[in-house]
Amino acid sequence: MSVLIPFSSYAQNLVEIQRAREVTNITQNGEPIRKMYDVRLKTGNIEMVSDSAWQFLDRNELRAYGNIEIETPDEIIWSDTLYYYTDQELSLLRGRVIIEQDSTTLFGEKVDYNFFTKVAFFEDGIRLEDEGGTLIAKKGTYYQNQDSAIFKGNVQLADTAQYAEGDSLFINRKSEYLELFSNIFVADSSNNGLLTGDYLQADSTGRRFVDGNSYFRKISADTTDTTHINSDELLLIEQDSVDLVRSYGNVRVWSSDFSSISDTLLYDSSTEIFELISNPIAWHNNIQLNGPYISVQMDSNEVRQLKTYHNTITVQEDSTTGRLHQIKGDTLIADFEEGDISRLKIYPNSQVLYHTTNEQGQPDGAVEYTSPQTVMYFRNGELQRVVAGKNDGYFFEEFSGLAERRLEGFKWNPELRPSRPDTIAEPRFPPVPTERPFTLPMRYLEHLLQNVPDN
């Protein structure tokens, strides 16, 4: 037979003793206390079982010890120790704490939980598990009604395809929106991608925005090439099998076949086109291309075509003599085959300075001319034939200063060329452990056997 007992003469909350093996009333330090053993209690919509419980009759406080299980319409909670203040709906859970809410299970050892606001404060470690993966951190706050959480200190998220870490995290799981702060690291094994930076914003649409010291690494599907992109900001949109990359501020790109610097970079994986905007410079093998806008057409990780418009200049370092061939024009299109330049078209207002060699491969003068259009054909990267319209030019005999001759607007900056990163970004923390942070309580194991027999 159950008994309803008020906490105090002014209390609105009543405790219903549904079952107790033993009940003892004592006075301690002048305060009446009811001690109960092997007890089942109910207060409001909260039901609880524990090995023992102390009810402080003159104040709104209930303490429970050992093998505790608490059930409400919204969650089930397991704990070793409970201090429950009924006037505040506040519970202090200590020991092995587990909170199960819908498809989410939270683990901690020091948790303050409010039954009214449905907010849980994890002060000494948190582990969150759901069908999407596992999240761990040193501290955290979980808002059940908003399905949101804030995590701080060594934050790690892991599922079968992705891993992420940072110093703090805000996440809304319903909308799949998150913000990751400071020292971020994200590895996506399904897309062979890696992100680092100061701040990450991501959502369910496949959008990821990195602000501050962004770094993006992409390994090709056949794993034969890797592209590295550094910038101040990066926007990555992954939709179906298409990647859209937008990089802004101090953009630096390196791959085995191509490298560049610019203020802005746009890339579309469906077309395999890099667009370099605002003060760009692009390099391929021994060629440097300058212009206000550069388009790079890739094909299976190889450069197929370079385009640049308006007052462009291209410099090619001769592989034998080291002299610098110079080509200017309003529009330049360079085609490549198997990694070597095969055709170069400059129009209109083309201007060319090309150094020549003798049969022994020694410098032997240069040709300089202007023409409405120039088309240059190469084989294995070596010039074979030039087709030009009506031109105006001359041939220089070899002299000591010829190697230093420059067309107006000449630019040659090998020192600015990005190089392959010396070190590869790696996680700071060990992998997320598959095991739970403590031995699971007996009543929780019984719950799993009854409700999740395959667990």
Image (tube, rainbow, N blue to C red):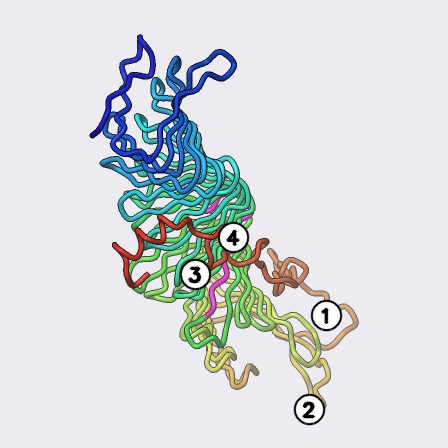
The Cα atoms of the two marked residues, 3 and 2, are separated by: 54 Å
Which disc, if any, is residue 359? 2
> What span is colored magenta in the figure?
210-219
Q: Secondary structure at mark 2?
A: loop
Is 419 a magenta residue?
no
Q: Is residue 212 visible?
A: no
Q: Earlier in the sequence, mark 3 or mark 2?
A: 3
The Cα atoms of the two marked residues, 2 and 1, are separated by: 18 Å
Quadrant containing the C terminus in the rendered view: bottom left
Residue 280 vertical position relative to residue 285 in the rendered view, above or below: above
Of circles 4 and 2, which is in front?
Answer: 4
Q: Classify 10 Å Cα crowding around label 2: few (below 14), some (14-19), many (20 and above).
A: few
Q: Which residue is mark 3?
A: 188
Quadrant containing the N terminus in the rendered view: top left
The Cα atoms of the two marked residues, 4 and 2, are separated by: 56 Å
Q: Which residue is mark 4?
A: 185
Residue 146 vertical position relative to residue 390 in the rendered view, above or below: above
Question: Which one is nearer the viewer's eye here, 404 or 441?
Answer: 441
The reply to whether discs 1 and 4 touch (Cβ–Cβ < 8 Å) is: no
Looking at the rendered structure, the kind of residue marked 2 is Glu
